[in-house]
């Protein structure tokens, strides 16, 4: 976990920006010794958003499976995908 003060952000923005692009982790900014905001690169943010969307879709699929919705076997999926790629 990377923690920096708001003074560092205010006085040395380039250092925080470079750090955000160097690491994929969020940088926690404190104000008066307390957590205040989180900073991260756009690339890291977009990756995180895509991961959250994927996890949400997987959770939805698992809930559907558990509730008895129709599923496909691996062979059925492979066959359907094979048809798509042959077109």
Image: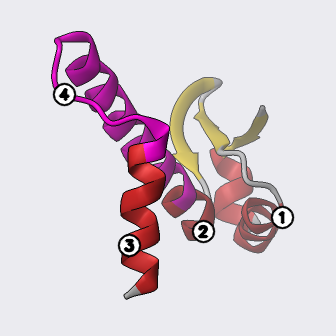
Nearer mark to the viewer, of 1 and 3: 3
Measured in 3D between alpha carbons, the distance from the residue under mark 3 to the one under mark 4, in whole angstroms, is: 21 Å
Query: Which image quarter holds the N terminus?
Result: top right
Of the numbered discs 3 and 4, the one sitting upstream in the chain is: 4
74 drawn magenta: yes
Of the numbered discs 4 and 2, the one sitting upstream in the chain is: 2
Badge 2 crowding class, 10 Å Cα cut-off, few under 14, some 14 to 19, many 20 or more, is few
Measured in 3D between alpha carbons, the distance from the residue under mark 3 to the one under mark 2, in whole angstroms, is: 35 Å
Q: Name the residue located 53 percent from the left edge and 50 percent from the top edge.
A: 48
Residue 71: image location, x then y, percent: 27, 30
Q: Is residue 40 above or below residue 81?
A: above
Of the numbered discs 4 and 1, the one sitting upstream in the chain is: 1
Nearer mark to the viewer, of 1 and 2: 2
Start-end of magenta stretch = 47-75
Disc ID at residue 35 = none
Residue 61: image location, x then y, percent: 29, 31
Measured in 3D between alpha carbons, the distance from the residue under mark 1 to the one under mark 3, in whole angstroms, is: 42 Å
Disc ID at residue 70 = 4
Measured in 3D between alpha carbons, the distance from the residue under mark 4 to the one under mark 2, in whole angstroms, is: 37 Å
Q: Main secondary structure of the magenta part?
A: helix
Badge 3 crowding class, 10 Å Cα cut-off, few under 14, some 14 to 19, many 20 or more, is few
Which residue corresponds to mark 1?
A: 22
For the residue pair 47 and 13, the one nearer the viewer reads as 47
Residue 13: image location, x then y, percent: 70, 69
Nearer mark to the viewer, of 4 and 2: 4
Nearer mark to the viewer, of 4 and 1: 4
Q: Label 2: state its secondary structure.
A: helix
Which residue corresponds to mark 2?
A: 43
Badge 1 crowding class, 10 Å Cα cut-off, few under 14, some 14 to 19, many 20 or more, is few
Q: Name the residue located 61 percent from the left edge and 56 percent from the top edge.
A: 40
Nearer mark to the viewer, of 3 and 2: 3
């Amino acid at each position: 976990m990377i923690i920096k003060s708001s003074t560092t952000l205010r006085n040395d923005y380039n250092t925080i920006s470079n750090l955000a692009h160097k690491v994929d982790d969020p940088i926690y900014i404190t104000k008066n010794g307390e957590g205040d905001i989180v900073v991260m690169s756009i690339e890291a943010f977009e990756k995180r958003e895509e991961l959250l969307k994927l996890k949400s879709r997987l959770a939805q699929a698992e809930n559907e499976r558990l509730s008895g919705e129709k599923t496909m076997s691996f062979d059925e999926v492979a066959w359907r995908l094979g048809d798509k790629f042959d077109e």
